[in-house]
């Protein structure tokens, strides 16, 4: 099922634990802050931790666990420079999903990035193994400005 939501949500993002190295190991916490204010919208705008760039996100599929039959969640990210322009370069987009309450990630299922039009990245292979609050960490380099942003989503059945 393809979901195309046209809701725009401007979200202020306060980064707790920014600059912490994110490990891909799911055995220990990657130092992520707590998920106390999830974004319940399926699309919106966010600004990176130290405001080097921003992104508009749109869940193409999800966020959902999918019940017994797990669902491959997908999202599209449209990056902008700090002053709202389409970037000349977009490299190194990495998304990590972490469930702080249970201290685990997505196991062997690592989200993968496919680059689209200039400034656009489609994130596929996001598998949530449980319902509840998950934190997504998006690391990217936009016009040579490396930064990250973090936000929480409430994953339903």
Image (spheres, rainbow, N blue to C red):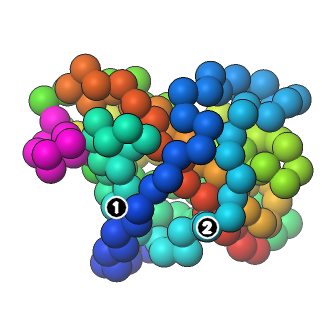
Read off the residue under disc 1. Answer: 45
Q: Secondary structure at mark 2?
A: loop
State the image quarter where residue 125 is shown. Answer: top right
Residue, x 30% and y 47% (percent of image)? 54
Q: Position of residue 129 (x, y in %)?
A: 80, 54
Q: Nearer the viewer, residue 35 or 156?
A: 35
Residue, x 77% and y 50% (percent of image)? 99
Q: Could you classify mark 1 by the number of other residues whose Cα lies within 10 Å: few (under 14), some (14-19), or many (20 or more)?
A: some
Residue 104 has which mark?
A: none
User: Which numbered disc, 1 or 2, marks the residue closer to the eye?
Assistant: 2
Distance in Å between CA atoms under marks 1 and 2: 15 Å
State the image quarter where residue 137 is shown. Answer: top right
Residue 44 in view (yes/no):
no
**On screen, residue 12 above or below 1:** above
* First reached walking from the N terminus: tag 1 or tag 2: 2
Prevailing secondary structure of the magenta residues: loop
Quarter of the C terminus within the rendering: bottom right
Q: Secondary structure at mark 1?
A: strand
Q: Nearer the viewer, residue 43 or 66?
A: 43
**Any magenta on residue 74?**
no
Q: Could you classify mark 2 by the number of other residues whose Cα lies within 10 Å: few (under 14), some (14-19), or many (20 or more)?
A: few
Q: Position of residue 63 (x, y in %)?
A: 60, 65
**On screen, residue 9 above or below 33:** below
Residue 37 has which mark?
A: 2
What range is drawn magenta here?
79-87
State the image quarter where residue 69 is shown. Answer: bottom right
Q: Position of residue 48 (x, y in %)?
A: 39, 43
Residue, x 32% and y 57% (percent of image)? 56
């Amino acid at each position: 099922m393809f979901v195309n939501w046209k809701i725009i949500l401007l979200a202020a993002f306060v980064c707790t634990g920014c600059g912490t190295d994110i490990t891909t190991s799911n055995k220990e916490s990657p130092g992520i802050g707590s998920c106390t204010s999830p974004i319940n919208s399926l699309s919106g705008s966010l600004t990176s931790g130290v405001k080097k760039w921003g992104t508009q996100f749109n869940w193409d599929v999800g966020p959902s666990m999918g019940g017994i039959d797990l669902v491959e969640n997908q999202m599209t990210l449209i990056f902008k420079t700090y002053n709202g322009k389409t970037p000349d370069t977009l490299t190194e987009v990495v998304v990590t999903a972490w469930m702080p309450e249970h201290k685990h990630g997505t196991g062997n299922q690592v989200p993968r990035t496919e680059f689209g039009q200039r400034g656009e990245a489609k994130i596929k292979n996001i598998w949530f193994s449980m319902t509840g609050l998950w934190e997504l960490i998006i690391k990217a380099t936009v016009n040579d400005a490396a930064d990250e942003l973090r936000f929480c989503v409430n994953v339903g059945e």
